[in-house]
Image: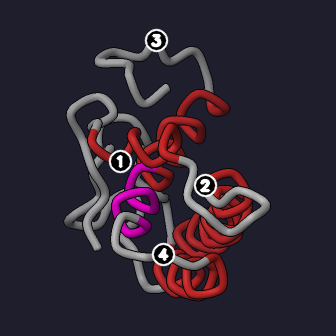
Amino acid sequence: NVLFRNFDVRGGADKTLIYLTLHAVQCLVKLEKIEDKGTAIRELRALSTKPFAVPGEAGFPLGGLFPAPANKTESDLFRTYFKQAREELAVRLCERVFDADGSKNKWWQAFSKKKFMGKELKD
């Protein structure tokens, strides 16, 4: 998905996929400077759990894609769900980026140079 410039959105699952693809690219950029898997998991967990913008807040990169939450409860629900999804994605991505011998997989790391749909998540 990282190579796509445009993405046909057909429903909520596509919106979630777009957001998580942006987070995956953010993780791959962070992994460029990390050489061992243990440090990578720790750093990506920290990245995934730190505060991030949700729809309706300044800094959310997909403002027109997700509707603004109607109230604080919806906002908190979105944040909780995406925090969990971001954490799980980060751990699973480490399993792909690092080979069994602990070396980096250059093919996965090459995707850190691409911007998905010309957007990125801010740290």
Mark 3 surroundings within 10 Å by alpha-carbon count, few (fewer than 14), some (14 through 19), many (20 or more): few
Q: Percent from the top left, x then y, of residue 82?
A: 61, 63
Q: Percent from the top left, x then y, of residue 55?
A: 39, 57
User: What separation in Å lies between label 1 and label 3 (alpha carbons)?
Assistant: 22 Å
The residue under label 1 is which amino acid type? Ser
In which image quadrant can residue 87 be found? bottom right
Q: Nearer the viewer, mark 4 or mark 1?
A: 4
User: What separation in Å lies between label 2 and label 3 (alpha carbons)?
Assistant: 27 Å
User: What separation in Å lies between label 2 and label 1 (alpha carbons)?
Assistant: 11 Å
Callout 2: helix, strand or loop? helix
Question: As displayed, is residue 7 above or below residue 44?
Answer: above
What residue is disc 1 on?
112
Mark with earlier residue (2, 4): 4
User: What separation in Å lies between label 3 and label 4 (alpha carbons)?
Assistant: 36 Å
Q: What range of the chain is rendered magenta?
A: 25-31
The residue under label 3 is which amino acid type? Asp
Callout 3: helix, strand or loop? loop
- The mark total stands at 4
What residue is disc 3 on?
8
Q: Nearer the viewer, mark 3 or mark 4?
A: 4
Task: Say which residue appears at 50% left-offset and 52% top-offset.
Answer: 24
What residue is disc 4 on?
35
Mark with earlier residue (2, 3): 3
Mark with earlier residue (1, 3): 3
Q: Nearer the viewer, mark 2 or mark 3?
A: 2
Q: Nearer the viewer, mark 1 or mark 3?
A: 1
Foreground pick, 100 / 41: 100
Callout 4: helix, strand or loop? loop
Residue 97's label in the rendered image is: 2
